[in-house]
Amino acid sequence: MTIVTGVTVRVPAKLNLQLAVGPPRADGYHDLVTVFHAVSLFDEVTAEPARRDAVTVSGEGADRVPAGRDNLALRAVAALRRAAAGPASAATGVHITIVKRIPVAAGLAGGSADAAAALVACNELWGGGLSQPQLLEVAARVGSDVGFALLGGTAVGRGRGERLTPALAPATQYHWVLAFADGQLSTPEVYAALDRLRARGERGDGQSPRAGGHRGVPPRGLAQPVLDAALMSALRSGEAAMVGRALSNDLQPAALSLFPALRKTLAAGLELGALGALVSGSGPTCVFLAASPDRALDLAVSLSGAGVCRSVARVAGPVPGAAVIPPPK
Ligand code: C5P
């Protein structure tokens, strides 16, 4: 019998290729239709048996990750323990070690990714044997984006984002440049800013709702969000240029209203030849689609030289969701 002493899981960041946001619901959340896309920027999360639950975080932005019970990965551990009440090992504590490369509060769902990785790692460690649908149920209770980090690939999210359907698309790899901002945005604050802009009949980019010229950000304050047929057909075609034209994010005007410097970043990327540009999720990371790995390299170098962001990363997507890294033989 093999005694499992620790399990390490690698988990990707996500982008939203479309993020359509409906009006606020009674529970404070917003109904969404979103197209999630997992990219090759990974955190690593290790779960080991311990006397009591604890978390250690190192790497990119580690000092800004909550270390106590508020840590999303520890909340995922507690939720899994409740769901997996059977196995005796689930009664013991667990030490979670997170090595971060996904920046914190950057619109890339890094905290949700760590929670998803903790679920996969503890399920393995405890021999819990929960199936992926069961893990997805637990994930939905922990946070809106946690389920997608389990699934990976490209998927449509509905509800709060937790109701997922994998997108049927050819195995095209897309090449992205991420521009990390010098600062952070809080997701609830960005949603609240969107509600305020909509209540005032504004989009947040200084233009009236009907002024046009700002692709993909219609005033959806009253309507229920709908999946963008143009984006889905672009994804089915595998044509990066079409995908670039169809990117959209209803949260972008709100993120720009709170972080106006991002306008310059987006404009610089488009001037430098990106096929499309948008704020990632609630921001402030900006995302650019490039036509090829070489174009992505050129764009990354030029963007970092332009002084419009803190740093850049080149990533590819889609990539698989949270997965155990086999221990070295
Ligand atoms: O689910 P999660 O904890 O990741 O959400 C963080 C915050 O983002 C929520 O408290 C809410 O303010 C906002 N949110 C929302 N509608 C969603 C997802 C998130 O309003 N569908």
Image (cartoon, helix red, strand yellow):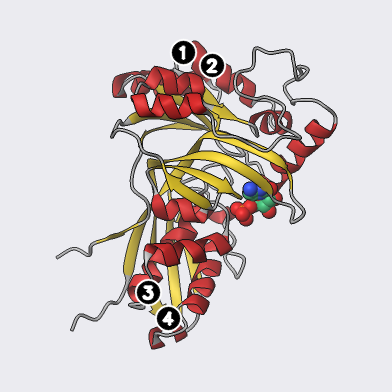
Callout 3: CB less than 8 Å from ligand 1 = no
Please name the amino acid that badge 4 sits on: Ala
Alpha-carbon span between mark 4 and mark 1: 50 Å
Residue 252 pos. (x, y %): 64, 30
Residue 240, percent from left and from top: 38, 22
Find disc 1 in the rendering and name its residue.
Answer: 272
Q: Are marks 2 and 1 in contact (CB under 8 Å)?
A: yes
The local crowd at label 3, few if under 14, some if 14 to 19, many if 20 or more residues have their Cα within 10 Å, is: some
- The disc, 4 or 1, on the residue closer to the chain's N-terminal end is 4
Check the image and report above or below for 134 versus 258.
Answer: below
Q: Of the numbered discs in the image, which one, if any, rests on residue 48?
A: 3
Q: In 3D space, how far apart are the residues under numbered discs 3 and 1 (Cα atoms)?
A: 46 Å
Can the viewer see residue 60 in this picture?
A: yes
Numbered circle sitting on residue 268: 2
- Residue drawn at the location 57% of the way across and 53% of the way down: 144
Relative to 31, residue 146 above or below: below
For the residue labelled by badge 2, is the local secondary structure a helix, a strand or a loop? helix
Residue type indicated by callout 1 = Leu
